[in-house]
Image (tube, rainbow, N blue to C red):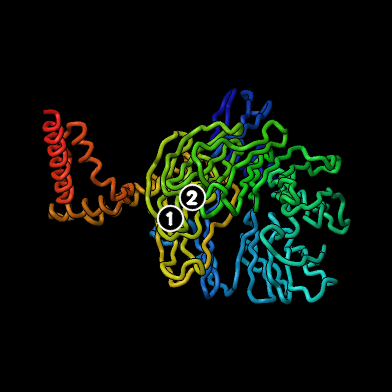
């Protein structure tokens, strides 16, 4: 406490309001310390006191965590940055056959055996509740971890084999029968990200529930004959998209409906198309736009063995219903919205594929070039993009800064099965996992510019994923990148001090080693040249009077001599016939 005597004296109190009011508490990562100004007369009696908050920055960003699962069970690592180059273990190994975080990262579902599912709290890392469900085939958590949905093998159609449990109390709140479990029918009950809306696809209709009270049963329904797939918008859950396949000469269609009780059963947007086998429905953040990848098993142009695909775009206000104009023919490999929901990136076309960023009106904003790519990953902050070629491609990766419209670096991650940005948007993790690949299993973590930060190999790895966190809980991406870069500089200084040597040759070898350890930019493979085109350069040189830039092969020289002799022979015959 500091005090000055006389009129207008002031002092600062170091206390703060623990009630979390306007003068104290933690708000958006900052602690408010009140500044009290006391105005006194000459006798020292205070006339009035004024409180002003003083902002002291306190870092409340959550730490990154990684779930790693192998044959013996799962563990939870601390995420980067690492002080000693290695992660520490936050949760010791727990035997299980499957593990999955809730969408908000508050709970962890662990399948321990064929009949036992445990729910863990991610903050306490302790088991909250255990469920015994015999003959279980599938399970999933709702986005906020409020409900657990299980699918069991049914012995008869009368048996209700899909059960919705409340994780806090362990009670069953809703049950229904479902014949089988597929990608389009599971989970049976879909939730919006805030769990305000819940719906289910049934035969020829979409059913809606009160997400806070399932005892009310079905509160609303839309009848859609032939509906085969639905996708509820996530944030907010204001609309639902329904796919109806083509039948008896009627084209397939995707329709968008409003989810409100007062909304009519008429679609707010609709798009029809022929030659459609399956669709992928992708909502943006804000629930204003829907990307539809239409896939056909047969390509009538016979250009692709894998069929053909088109990218369609629909808006909830009806301003756009049509095909996204792609500048290269071929399949649509991947598409993803930015975190803002105002731009989307697409990878499309025959190899080498092309990547483009579009705005909400389907106008191209940024061309990312061409290459052996089939995957696009937009970081949660919307600043960085990773363009990659996984699966049957060699694993090339290109990192872009979207805000500055420039490429940051290139590298490779061969045989990657999964890939995702960290919640703070600074790191990119790839993993090679079984059973897709039985060898060379491991984890790689890259910086936002493509430089390799961490690598660990496993005899067998089944799963590696980030613990979900809201991107808004982290600071600005530019500040995070600066802090990470400062950590890298500090590590380099420590390594440099530890490797000092009086031998200049040792220093030069160290510098060369450092230069070679940095991931060099991958060279693009040379284009394929058919046999008849290998001598094209020499032929062009002969035709246009230029000397060949490379030494000609023996066969090329032999053929050139034959052609010269034939020309001389023809010229002599022409001369004799003319005389």
> CA gap, disc 2 to disc 1?
8 Å
Disc 1 crowd rating (10 Å Cα; few below 14, some 14-19, many 20+) is some
**Residue on which disc 1 sits:** 393
Q: From this viewpoint, is residue 12 visible?
A: no
Label 1: element kind: loop
User: Measuring 74% from the left and 51% from the top, which residue is drawn there?
Assistant: 247
Which residue is located at x 17 percent, y 42 percent? 563
Please give left or right for residue 528 compared with residue 383 in the image: left
| Residue 171 image offset from top left, x and y in percent | 80, 67
**Is 513 rendered above or below residue 151?**
above
Q: Is residue 434 visible?
A: yes
Q: Is the N terminus in the top left, top right, bottom left or bottom right quadrant?
A: top right
Residue 32 point in image, percent of width and height = 60, 39
Circle number at residue 427 = none
Do the CB atoms of the residues marked 2 and 1 lie less than 8 Å apart? yes
420 and 103: which one is in front? 420
Please tell me in which quadrant of the rendered image residue 445 appears.
bottom left
Q: Secondary structure at mark 2?
A: loop
According to the picture, the residue beneath numbered tag 2 turns out to be 374
């Amino acid at each position: 406490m500091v005090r000055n005597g006389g009129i207008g004296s002031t002092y600062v109190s170091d206390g703060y309001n623990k009630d979390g009011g306007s003068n104290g508490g933690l708000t958006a990562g900052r602690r408010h310390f009140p500044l009290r100004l006391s105005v006194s007369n000459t006798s020292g009696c205070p006339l009035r006191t004024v409180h002003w908050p003083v902002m002291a920055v306190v870092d409340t960003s959550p730490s990154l965590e990684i779930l790693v699962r192998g044959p013996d069970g799962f563990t939870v690592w601390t995420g980067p940055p690492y002080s000693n180059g290695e992660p520490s273990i936050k949760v010791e190994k727990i035997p299980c056959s499957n593990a999955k975080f809730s969408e908000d990262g508050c709970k962890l579902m662990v399948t321990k055996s064929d009949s036992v599912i445990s729910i863990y709290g991610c903050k306490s890392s302790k088991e909250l509740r255990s469920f015994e469900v015999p003959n279980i085939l599938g399970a999933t958590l709702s986005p906020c971890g409020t409900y657990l949905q299980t699918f069991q093998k049914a012995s008869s159609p009368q048996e209700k084999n899909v059960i919705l449990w409340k994780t806090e109390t362990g009670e069953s709140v809703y049950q229904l029968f479902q014949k089988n479990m597929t990608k389009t029918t599971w989970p049976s009950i879909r939730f919006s990200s805030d769990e305000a809306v819940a719906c289910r696809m049934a035969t020829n209709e979409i059913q809606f529930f009160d997400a806070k009270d399932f005892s009310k049963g079905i509160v609303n329904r839309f009848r859609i004959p032939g509906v085969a797939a639905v996708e509820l918008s996530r944030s907010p859950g204001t609309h639902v998209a329904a796919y109806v396949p083509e039948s008896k000469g009627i084209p397939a269609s995707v329709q968008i409906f409003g989810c409100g009780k007062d909304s009519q059963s008429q679609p707010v947007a609709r798009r029809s198309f022929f030659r459609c086998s399956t669709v992928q429905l992708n909502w943006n953040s804000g629930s204003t736009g829907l990307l539809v990848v239409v896939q056909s098993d047969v390509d009538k142009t016979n250009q692709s063995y894998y069929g053909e695909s088109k990218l369609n775009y629909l808006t909830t206000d009806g301003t756009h219903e049509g095909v996204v104009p792609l500048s290269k023919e071929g399949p649509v490999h991947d598409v993803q919205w930015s975190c803002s929901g105002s731009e989307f990136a697409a990878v499309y076309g025959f190899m080498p594929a092309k990547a483009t960023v579009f705005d909400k009106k389907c106008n191209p904003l940024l061309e990312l070039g061409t290459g052996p790519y089939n995957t696009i990953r937009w970081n949660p902050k919307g600043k960085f993009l990773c363009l990659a070629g996984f699966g049957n491609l060699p694993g090339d990766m290109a990192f872009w800064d979207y805000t500055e419209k420039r490429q940051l670096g290139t590298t490779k991650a061969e045989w990657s099965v999964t890939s995702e940005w960290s919640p703070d948007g600074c790191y990119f993790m790839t993993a090679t996992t079984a059973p897709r690949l039985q060898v060379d299993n491991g984890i790689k973590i890259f910086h936002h510019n493509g430089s390799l930060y961490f690598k660990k190999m496993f005899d067998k790895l089944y799963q590696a994923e980030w613990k979900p966190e809201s991107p808004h809980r982290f600071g600005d991406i530019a500040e995070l990148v600066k802090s990470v870069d400062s950590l890298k500089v500090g590590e380099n200084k420590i390594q440099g001090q530890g490797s000092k040597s009086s031998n200049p040759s040792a220093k030069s070898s160290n510098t060369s080693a450092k230069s070679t350890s940095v991931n060099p930019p991958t060279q693009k493979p040379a284009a394929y040249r058919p046999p008849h085109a290998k001598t094209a350069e020499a032929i062009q040189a002969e035709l246009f009077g230029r000397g060949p830039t490379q030494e000609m092969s023996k066969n090329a020289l032999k053929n050139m001599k034959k052609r010269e002799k034939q020309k001389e022979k023809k010229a002599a015959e022409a001369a004799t016939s003319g005389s």
